[in-house]
Amino acid sequence: GPGTLAAAGYAGRRGHPVLFGAAHWAGVAAGAAGDQGARSYLAMHAGGLALVECGDIAEPHDIDTPDDLWRLGGG
């Protein structure tokens, strides 16, 4: 729903992707800058974040640029 705030978890640690319900969009956009994205918003709302364990089906890599992909051997 609109208030959803959830993230993939890997061994209990927050990772990517992160899902922001519509109620969070304005707050995330207001604080997003460069590669920091929503990091500060997530820190302020950590108590409402649902962590969905994904370590058994995925890797915790954040790929934002072609260089990120290349470093992981995909380029």
Image (tube, rainbow, N blue to C red):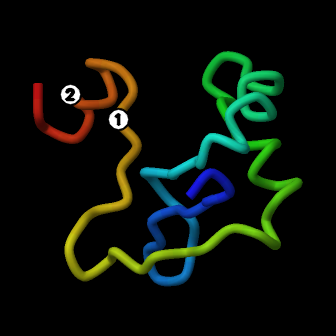
Q: Residue type at mark 2: give it.
A: Trp
Q: How many marks?
A: 2
Q: Is residue 65 left or right of residue 2?
A: left
Assess whether mark 2 and mark 1 are in contact (beta carbons under 8 angstroms): no
Quick check: 66 above or below 73? above
Q: Nearer the viewer, residue 47 or 56?
A: 47
The residue that disc 1 covers is 63
Q: Position of residue 12 (x, y in %)?
A: 54, 82
Q: Is residue 19 left or right of residue 49?
A: left
Residue at point 35%, 35% (across, down): 63
Q: Quadrant of the C terminus?
A: top left
Disc 1 residue type (three-letter): Ile
Q: Which residue is mark 2?
A: 70
Judged from the image, the secondary structure of the residue bearing numbered disc 2 is helix
Task: Tell me the crowding category of disc 2: few under 14, some 14 to 19, or many 20 or more residues within 10 angstroms, Cα based.
Answer: few
Position of the N terminus, as image quadrant, is bottom right
Q: Which residue, as the protein is rendered here, is positioned at the far right?
A: 44
Residue located 57% across and 66% down the image? 14
Q: Residues within 10 Å of mark 1 (few under 14, many from 20)?
A: few
Please identify the quarter of the rendering in which residue 24 is found: top right
Q: Which residue is pictured at 71% across the width and 44% down the height?
A: 23
Locate residue 45, reporting x and y percent.
82, 59
CA–CA distance between discs 1 and 2? 10 Å
The one of 8 and 48 positioned closer to us in this rendering: 48
Please name whichever residue, 26 or 65, is drawn nearer the observer in this view of the structure. 26
Establish if 64 lies above or below 55: above
**Residue 11, image x, y percentages:** 46, 82
Question: Would residue 25 appear left or right of 7 to someone viewing this image?
Answer: right
- Figure quadrant of residue 50: bottom right
Front tag of 1 and 2: 1
